[in-house]
Amino acid sequence: MKQPPRSALILLIAALQFTYILDFIMVMPLAPDLSRSLQFNVQKIGLLSAAYTGASMFLGALSLKFIDRYNRRTLLLSSWGVFALSTLMCAWAQNFQQLFFTRALVGASGSMALSIAMAIAIDITPPHHLGRVMAKIMTGFTLATVLGVPLVLTLSEQYGWQYCFLLIGLLAVVLYVYTYFKLPSSNSVLDEPEKKDASAYFLKQPNIIRMYILQALNQFSAFLIIPTLSAYLMFNFAIEREYLPYFYLLGGVVSFITIHTLGRIADNKSTDMTLFLGTTIYATGLFAFSFNALPIWLTLVCFVAFMAGNAGRNISLTTSSSRIPEPSFRARYMTFQGFVRDASITLASVLSSTVLNTQNNGYIENMPILIALSLLTALYVLYAHHTWFHKK
């Protein structure tokens, strides 16, 4: 099979990223709709995130021994096929337990598919272009918030939340078919027998361990807040349900600009600088959420700052991380990075559900505790990245 241009492969991977991210994040803004329809407490939405990332973490751990030894095209198609089917299954969930189980299937398969896709992207990209390419791929994340979340919120309000899962599932099927016909066979880049216990070898590299710690803490700080943010806006800040799509739309547009701007700065200057900028914006927006009495315009500004700042932190660490692995360990590196990320998101989601308490009128208590913990963690990531990597 003739390999398509690199730009076409990057576009495909960005589309896979868009679908995967939208599938993951849309459950959180849909929390009020899901809780009413399936009759569960809104604070349990964090457990759905935990099911998604926990299953992903488990499969990621199992795959470390073989993921760099098999054809990447075959692994991508297999895992993405399960992702598409299990997303469609979510539309038929009748209660919280069934949705919990199907979300676990989606998380396990989708995370593996994205790990392989990211490994392919790094394989075909010159090191000095990684910041720009990672920004293009992360456009999928931004479009998920700019277009995807407002779309699914409107679709859920007009027709029901089930149609959101049907839409994403059908999109995943279309991408599966395109990938099947367009993605060339991609074997492991290893040309010689694998070192004995190679997983242990690459996990002993200091910079790999340090980056995993930063990635884990970065996701932990964000997902203390993200799962219940839409419900928090509605019940604590009195934002009408009909306005939520506009919040996510504007937040996504600004995040899109932030990602591409900081991606170029990361290539031309340093990821340390972009991480500082992203963290500052993130912390400013998040801190303001500790005050419940804010006018709607200021609430919108804080929400946009939170989203854009978090996007800036993500592109900074993603670019920095993509420069670390040796070619022979790329898929394994990305898979274990996904394992670490999912473990931290699972822990944050469970902790969030445990700390928060919901009153009968929907008002969410104890959010300032999570905000403080998130701020401290984000600041530590900034400090540790500067200490560990900026001196080089």
Image (spheres, rainbow, N blue to C red):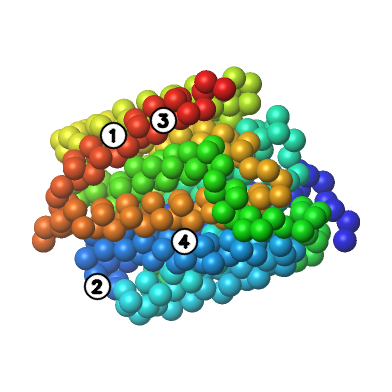
Secondary structure beneath label 2:
loop
Eye-nearest disc, 2 or 4: 4
Measure the alpha-carbon separation of dots 1 and 2: 35 Å
Q: Residue at x 77, y 58 (%)?
A: 193
The residue wearing badge 4 is: 57
Residue contact between numbered discs 2 and 3, judged by CB atoms under 8 Å: no
Considering depth in this image, is 98 or 155 the residue closer to the camera? 98
| Residue at 63% over, 26% down | 267
Q: In the drawing, does residue 1 fall left or right of residue 173?
A: right
Mark 1: amino acid: Leu
Relative to 242, residue 254 above or below:
above
Q: Which residue is mark 3?
A: 384
Of helix, strand and loop, which one carries label 1? helix
Where does the C terminus fall, quadrant-wise? top right
Residue 376, numbered circle: 1
**Where is the N terminus found, in terms of image quarters?**
bottom right
**Viewer-nearest of discs 1 and 2:** 1
User: Are the residues at dot 1 and dot 2 in contact (C-beta closer than 8 Å)?
Assistant: no
**Mark carried by residue 216:** none
**Disc 1: CA contacts within 10 A as few (<14), some (14-19) or many (>=20):** few
Q: Position of residue 262 (x, y in %)?
A: 54, 28
Residue sitting farthest toward the front: 196
Residue 349 visible at all: yes
Q: Earlier in the sequence, mark 1 or mark 3?
A: 1
* Residue 39, numbered label: 2
**Whole-Å distance between the Cαs marked 2 and 4?**
28 Å
